[in-house]
Amino acid sequence: MAIVTLTTDLGTKDFYAASLKGKIYSLCPNVTIVDITHEIPPFDTGIAAFSLKNTYHDFPEGSIHIIGVDPVEKEDQKHVVVFHDGHYFISADNGVFSFLFDKTPQQVLKIKPSNTSLTTTFPAKDIFATVAAHLASGKELNEVTSGSHIIVDRNSIIPTLESNTIIGHAIYIDSMGNITTDITKDTFVQMGMGRTFEIGFRRPDNSIRKISSYYNQVPKGEKLALFNNCNNLEIAINEGSAAKLFGMKRGDVIRVNFTD
């Protein structure tokens, strides 16, 4: 049974997400639909990519992933199907793939234009759902695509590495107020080489000098840093909201200073 996942900014208050699912079911009744999230901030392709990047590997190969964020086709933003790591991704080429993949995708194909391509106000339903149902039914990819495409390359914010410092950024704040940074465990280990360190953000008294293994390794209400299941450095409060307590928001700077 084919799996189709949905990552959109449609929210759950309105009927749009249900309408999208209904369209897929009407075209392919035996499909399994999984919501990654419908709570992406409007037009935020960076958060959409981050959410999907950290989940699609958990699904079996052959899964089909609809990205319904900033989905309108424009002259420089074509509708595409990407095949990578054994998975299919259906989206507008709006820069999301620059954030989603660490290397060039294996195959990128333009979706064949339809009568609704230029007039639809709901391309995730009218176009992406149709293509997803087509693939979920076991039909050939070339029946809905019209040739290769070079994806748009949008520069993402990445950590800056200095001699003894990593300058990173808050890239994701979850519903618990935990702050994920763009500093990976690999970068931290390679840069640190076992040296002592200080993680600083916002104010000097917010510094953290150790990495915890889990949240309740510190007393309730205390701040901590750990590497989360995405292998990114995370700032958190045990049973509290780090974002609220520290006034942190996406894009804020987090510095890791190493000392010899």
Image: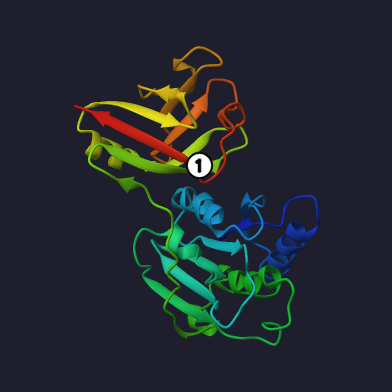
Residue in the picture at 48% in, 66% down: 88
Residue ID for mark 1: 252
Q: Position of residue 55 (x, y in %)?
A: 49, 49
- Asked whether, in this view, residue 221 is left or right of residue 122, the answer is left
Q: Position of residue 241 (x, y in %)?
A: 60, 27
Considering only vertical position in the picture, is 113 above or below 192?
A: below
Pointer 1 local density, CA inside 10 Å: few below 14, some 14–19, many at least 20: some
Q: Quadrant of the C terminus?
A: top left
Considering only vertical position in the picture, is 108 above or below 174?
A: below
Residue toward you, 160 or 190? 160
- Asked whether, in this view, residue 163 is left or right of residue 139, the answer is left
- Secondary structure of the residue carrying numbered label 1: loop
Considering only vertical position in the picture, is 247 above or below 115?
A: above
Q: Quadrant of residue 132?
A: bottom right
- Asked whether, in this view, residue 117 is left or right of residue 49, the answer is right
Residue in the picture at 38% in, 29% down: 199
**Visible residue check, residue 214:** no
Residue in the picture at 77% in, 63% down: 19
Outermost residue on the right side: it is 14
Residue toward you, 204 or 52? 204
- Asked whether, in this view, residue 72 is left or right of residue 238, the answer is right
Outermost residue on the top side: it is 219
Outermost residue on the front side: it is 204
Q: Position of residue 120 (x, y in %)?
A: 73, 78
